[in-house]
Amino acid sequence: MTELAHLQQQTGPIVWVLSTGEDYEGGCILGVYASKDTARGPFVEAAKRIPFDLDQAWQDEESGAVHAHGGCDWVSLEPHPLITATQLA
């Protein structure tokens, strides 16, 4: 069972978070999507805005997350559980 399937089985719905930033400086969320397919175009557009040549692009086999990196800039599309109820500590 993949990490994504396990996460979905444990938590319910999954959303895809598109974020960008710079190494060691944090980042910001560009959008939250209901599916990876819906986020595909925005991910490609965000990767095109990296001002340096891409030096890495990869997909995590387990979760399906995708990443692009150029210079010190990065873009990531990662699955996260959708929280639908108050969480108890």
Image: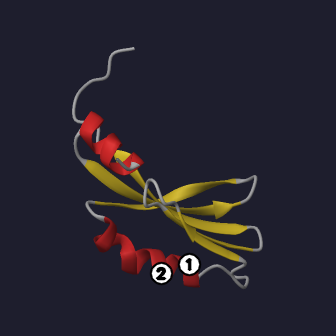
Disc 2 target residue:
44
Q: How many marks?
A: 2
SS at circle 2: helix
Q: Contact (CB < 8 A) between labels 1 and 2?
A: yes
Q: Toward which corner of the image does residue 56 lie, by quadrant?
A: bottom right
Q: Residue at x 48, y 82 (%)?
A: 45
Where residue 76 sits: x, y (%)?
53, 63
Using the image as rendered, state which of residue 66 and residue 1 is in the foreground: 1
Using the image as rendered, state which of residue 59 and residue 15 is in the foreground: 59
Using the image as rendered, state which of residue 28 and residue 3 is in the foreground: 3
Where residue 35 sits: x, y (%)?
28, 64
Disc 2: CA contacts within 10 A as few (<14), some (14-19) or many (>=20)? few
Q: Quadrant of the C terminus?
A: top left
Work out how far the residue at label 1 is from the one at label 2, CA to CA, in angstroms: 5 Å
Where residue 51 sits: x, y (%)?
69, 82
Where residue 57 sits: x, y (%)?
61, 74
Q: Residue at x 73, y 82 (%)?
A: 52
Q: Callout 1, which amino acid?
A: Ala
Disc 1 target residue:
47
Scheme of colours in the image = secondary structure
Above or below — where is 36 with respect to 6? below
Above or below — where is 44 with respect to 19? below
Above or below — where is 82 with respect to 43? above
Disc 1: CA contacts within 10 A as few (<14), some (14-19) or many (>=20)? many
In the displayed structure, does residue 82 sit left or right of residue 47? left
Q: Toward which corner of the image does residue 28 lie, by quadrant?
A: bottom right
Q: Callout 2, which amino acid?
A: Val
